[in-house]
Amino acid sequence: MIYLDYQATTPLAPEAREAMLRWLGGPESETFGNPHSPHRMGRMAAAAVEAAREQVAALMPSGGRTLFTSGATEALNMVLLGSEGDVLTFATEHAAVLDCQRAVEAQGRRFTVLPVLPDGRADLDALQAAITPKVGLVAIMAVNNEIGVVHPLEEAIAIARESGAKVLVDAVQALGRLALTPSRPPLAPDFIAVSGHKIHGPKGIGALWMAQGASIQPLVHGGGQEASLRSGTLSPALCAGLGAACRVAAEGMEAQMFHVKHLWNIARDLFADWDLNGSAGHRWHGNLNIRRDGLDVARLMSDCRQVMFSAGSACASGSGRPSHVLRALGLTEAQAKSSIRLGFGRYTTAADLESAAAMLNAAAKEQGL
């Protein structure tokens, strides 16, 4: 099996697994305590949670606070539904943002979806034209999950600041890969949402970073364990796993960027006859979204069952609809449906790419392409 679906999820890092095992204690251990209990076992668990919180916060801008969530979807929903004012976002955002439109509008707030440029980057002119003093929040990805395009975050934040709007960044695909600290400190986001399983951590855990002074209304009630903004008992094991994954990512970020860029160059040569979707220059190089006009992707997947790749976002897999991201770039429905996404990263080898390319190219040739 060759795994090339790093945007959907990543293999659990051994360091994250080891960190989690200690807090999956059985009845004979002292590590199964509720981190919100006042006794010694509870304080031990709470200390593990706080240590993990510091490890996650180390990848965020300085200052602010970090809240644990069940994942980025919850974190994004918390901000979108718990903030004030109208919302502006972009057509290539994740469903966790776009599908909040009805809920936001039910609160009496406008939710406007802006276009992107043909290369997939945010249309800043459209943002400038749409923003008004009534806009309370601009939601924008750091790195697109389907095509890997990196958005001009600092420019978008500068436009939002002019009207007093706050900025929510979906950093799921950027955390541990690209620095989230802006080159110009005043242009840091107000909110950053991340997810554990996209950074070699466990599934079921994520985080929301909030800048100093940023505030939202709670989405979940019933205890207020996380700064009175999120209720529910935290899992020390999941928190520890995410913390360890963030620590490993921080320590190896430069090496990973070099490794992934090397794999990208190999992959571009191996798939030279395919068309690239999205910007070639402004991107995370672990995401290769390509197409062959006329390609039957379902048949390709059936013929190449040893290669784990995607036809789009895992969240929309099986819907039968063409990718909303690719359509937003101006691709036809047929072109969108003839595209595939290859995702690679820390544990991918050049041999993996070469073997996968041989199978995928051979299968495409069998289709007469």
Image: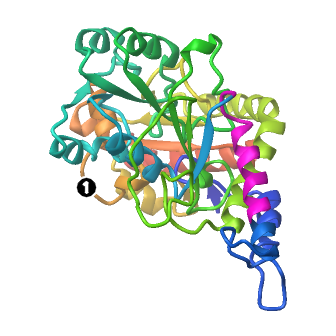
Q: Nearer the viewer, residue 51 or 259?
A: 51
Residue occupying the far front of the picture: 38
Check the image and report above or below for 275 versus 104.
Answer: above
The answer to which quarter of the image holds residue 85 is top left
Position above or below: 236 against 326: below
Q: Is residue 316 left or right of residue 106?
A: right
Residue 224, image x and y in percent?
Answer: 50, 59
Residue 278 percent location from the top left of the image: 43, 25
Assign a secondary structure to mark 1.
loop
Residue at x 34%, y 53% (from the top left corner): 316
Position of residue 226 measured from the top left corner of the image (x, y, whole percent) = 56, 55
Kindly report the secondary structure that dominates the magenta region of the rendered protein: helix
* Quadrant in which the N terminus appears: bottom right
Most foreground residue, 332 or 164:
164
Q: Amino acid at mark 1?
A: Gly
Left-right relation of 321 to 195: left
| Residue at 72% over, 71% down | 38
Is residue 91 visible to the viewer in this orientation of the structure?
yes
Q: Residue at x 27, y 22 (%)?
A: 135
- Asked which quadrant contains residue 369, the reply is top left
Q: Is residue 53 magenta?
A: yes
Q: Which residues are magenta?
A: 46-62
321 relative to 280, above or below: below
Residue 163 percent coordinates (x, y): 34, 12
Please give the residue where the numbered disc 1 appears in the rendered image. 320
